[in-house]
Image (cartoon, helix red, strand yellow):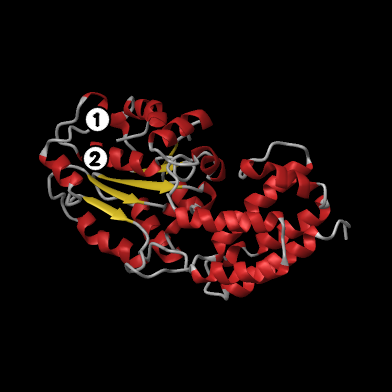
Amino acid sequence: MIYPWHSNTWQQLTMHWHHQPNAWLLLGKSNTGKSAFALHLAQSLLCESPQPHHEPCGTCPSCHLFNQGTHPDFYSLTPEQPEEGTTSRKLLNIKIDAVRAILEPLMQSSVRGGRRVVLINPAESLNTQAANALLKILEEPPEAVIFLLVAHNRDRVLPTIKSRCRQLLLPAPDFQAALIFAKKQQIENAENLLAFHSQAPLFPHTPEQDELREKLIDLLAQPRLLAILDYAAEFDKTKLPLATLLDWMNKWLIDLALAQQNMNVMYYPHHKDSLKNLATQTNPATLFHFQAALNALAPYGHHSLNVKMQTESLLCEYLTFTQNKSSN
C-alpha cells in the first residue's frame, strides 16, 4: 500500500512504467511513508498479473511470496539490529558483508524468470565499504535488476551513488492531512506529537521516551543544578544514545530562537509560554554560542562515550547560558 499523500507521485511514476531505471533513489522526510512506497513499488515490479496503473494484484504466486516475505527474487538490505532484549548506542549500519551476500545470486538467473529487486533502506546507513561495493554493482548492473534506495537525507548519500540513480522526491503531507491521519490512529496528544516530529505522521510511538522528553523540557524551562544531576542519571539508565538528547535539546533551542524573534514556535507549542518567558531572559548571542557547542557534539551522538557525563556537562552549560544575558 501507499499513503494518500503519495498517490499523485505513484500516478506520475506509472505514466513512464516501461522506462524503468536500473536504480531509484526515493527521497523524503523521515516517517512519511517512503518505506511503504518502496515496498509497494517492489511488489509491483515483481507481480506476475499487474492491475491497472501497475498496482500489484496481491493474488499471484509472486505477490503471495512477497507478502510472506519469502520472494526469492527480492533482496532487502537494512542495518543490523541489536539482539532482542539488548540496547545499542552505536549507529546501526549496513555492512559490506550484506552487500557481498547478494552479489552471487544477482549474477545468476532470476528464480521466477522475471525481474529482481534490491531494496536498501536507508541508503545513508551503508558504511563506506558497503557503499563502495554497491557503487561497483550500480556501475555495471546485472540484467533485469532494479535497485530501490530509500534515503531520509539526500546529502548523506554518496554523490557517485546519487549520480547513478533516478531521484524521486516523495512529499510529506501537510499538517492538516497528517493530523487527520494521526487522529484516525487514535494517537493521544496527536497535535503536540506531530509538532515535535516535524509533522511526520508515521512517527514511532514511544510513550516512555515522550515522558522522559517532557521531563527534560520542564527542566530546560526552569533549570536547576540538582535536578540536572538527577535527570542525567535517569537518562543514562535508558541506554538511549546521546543523539536523542541532542535532538530534543536542539529543537528546544530552535523554538527559543523563534520566541526571541516573536515568532511562532515549531516543536514544543504546548510550552510556548515558558519559551516566551525564557526568551526575555536570554541573549541571542549566547544562544548562538551554546547551539554551536551542541552542534559540535552531533558527530559523537552514537559513540560509546560516557553519556551520563556528557548529559551533565551539556545541561550545566545550559544552566550557565540561561543565567548569562551578556553577549560575551
Q: In the image, what residue occupies the spot 62% across and 75% down? A: 309
Q: Is residue 123 left or right of residue 213?
A: left
- Quadrant where the C terminus is found in the figure: bottom right
- Quadrant where the N terminus is found in the figure: top left
Q: In the image, what residue occupies the spot 32% across and 36% down? A: 20
Give the residue type that dot 1 points to.
Glu
Packing grade of label 2 (10 A; few <14, some 14-19, many >=20) is many
- Identify the image quadrant of residue 18: top left
Q: What is the number of the mark on residue 55?
A: 1
Q: In the image, what residue occupies the spot 34% across and 45% down? A: 148
Place of residue 190 in the rendered image (x, y in percent of width and height, measured from the top left): 49, 39
Distance between the Cα atoms at labels 1 and 2?
A: 9 Å
Q: In the image, what residue occupies the spot 33% across and 69% down? A: 83
Give the residue type that dot 2 points to.
Gln
Q: Is residue 44 placed above or below 81 in the rendered structure?
A: above
In the depicted view, which residue is nearer to us: 246 or 186? 186
- For mark 1, give the secondary structure: loop
- For mark 2, give the secondary structure: helix
In the depicted view, which residue is nearer to us: 279 or 284? 279
Q: What is the number of the mark on residue 219?
A: none
- Identify the image quadrant of residue 127: bottom left
Q: Is residue 241 visible?
A: yes
Place of residue 303 in the rendered image (x, y in percent of width and height, measured from the top left): 53, 71
User: Which badge, 1 or 2, is on the more N-terminal residue?
Assistant: 2
In the depicted view, which residue is nearer to us: 24 or 150? 150
Q: Is residue 41 placed above or below 65 in the rendered structure?
A: above
Q: Is residue 247 visible?
A: no
Q: Is residue 96 left or right of residue 55?
A: right
Place of residue 294 in the rendered image (x, y in percent of width and height, measured from the top left): 67, 61
Q: Is residue 61 left or right of residue 166?
A: left
Residue that carries the numbered disc 2 in the rendered image: 43
